[in-house]
Image (tube, rainbow, N blue to C red):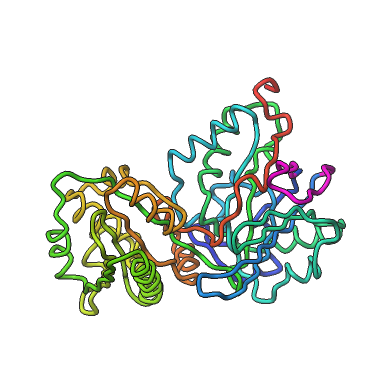
Amino acid sequence: MRDARRARFSQPSKAETRTVTAIAPFICLPAAPAEAAAAPPPGAPALYAYRVDYRTAGGLEKTRLGIVAGIDPFKVENPDVVPIAEAEPARTEAALAALRTAGVKTGVVVAGYEDAHFEVERILGRGPSVPPRVHARAHETHAVWPVSGERAARELARFFALKACVPFDGLHHFKAARRFRDEMRGAAEQAFYPLALLVNVLDFGMSFGSYTYLAPPREGFDINRFVAACDESFTLQDYRWEDDAGRARAWREFHEDLRIRGTTAVAVGAAFAGTRQFLLFTLKENVPPASLLPPDTPTALHEFAVMHLRLGFVARRYFETEDAAQAWNRIAVFPTPDEALAALDARGGAAFFVSPPNKRALMALAQARRRLPPDSVRLNPGVPEGLFTEKIAGGGRGSA
């Protein structure tokens, strides 16, 4: 048997028969009319295929394929289902409240796996055999359809039974499912499996994004003192503007430079209400990342910019405190930089940005069995809310 202290991402030997990633079919409820151009009719439980066609900020056209299924969150000792981020407590409570109120699952856990030979695409064939449910929004088209045929479903189940699974977003659905299962009686455990979108991290169309963070206004904040406190460890580049057109141009340049620099170094961006500039801080070459973090920080986390953002920028330099957890509780999280920038204009304070994490670094993090803080990694583009919904059969309070 494998060493239960670590995850492996190579295929198991034939002597190994233990299930690795347990997936289960479910019934995807029809979406609201405003959300769907066409919907698969309800019927027997099924696995679902999901595809998004989208355009990147740089104008590239990409396609990403995935499988949506119930995924087992209860075998917490399983070394091959390895979350790489903590669940956010408030979002866990919200998901749990939805389960308690109506026994309905909404939202998905997003999990990655490695498939160098693109076996899932081969199993699914070229496209849907029934009209897909379609959700279109700017620069994105999302489609979902049931996987038809028992053979395809069996092949997918066998494929994922041999795959390590790395959940990286939506972990609050895992936590909520565990707590709800403990509260309820009278339903099979599989009924509580949260929905999961399984994506191949080796797919060209697969890309991670970063959340963006907004700190509230702080009385007595001095931007010059903030910048001076960064000077010893970080180089600074500023992107200034004078009018709306200049701001849009500066924003594009800043965002692109943050993305590029963040692939090879620790880089953090910032914008402050009442100023006409974006600031990009890049760790100096002669400064070890470990020197800026607490001594007990695991090595696998040293290179992740979000770790430096939480302690060095938000806690020490903005709120001027060593209590990173308390400072972080005051932060609002946004799924896109544009949304955070709009909130900055409306609310004031400071917005902080980091570049998306590297795919390989995230998989290595799973192998090291370490976790990032909540809201550190997201799928880009994300899954529209409500695209996948399932009611827990026999899971209501009256079924106890």
Spot the residue most to the bottom.
Answer: 285
Whether residue 53 is situated above or below residue 143 in the rendered picture: below
Q: In front here: 317 or 170?
A: 317
Whether residue 100 is situated above or below residue 6 in the rendered picture: above
Residue 157 image position (x, y, % from top left): 75, 58
Q: Is residue 20 left or right of residue 347?
A: right
Residue 103 image position (x, y, % from top left): 65, 31
Q: Is residue 300 visible?
A: no
* Count of picture labels: 0
On whether residue 40 falls in the magenta region, the answer is: yes
On whether residue 4 falls in the magenta region, the answer is: no
Q: Is residue 84 left or right of residue 388?
A: left
Residue located at (59% from left, 47% from top): 75
Residue 400 image position (x, y, % from top left): 67, 22
Magenta-drawn segment: 28-44
Residue 309 image position (x, y, % from top left): 30, 59
Residue located at (27% from left, 43% from top): 326
Whether residue 111 is situated above or below residue 72 in the rendered picture: below
Q: Is residue 356 visible?
A: yes
Residue located at (62% from left, 57% from top): 137
Where does the N terminus fall, quadrant-wise? bottom right
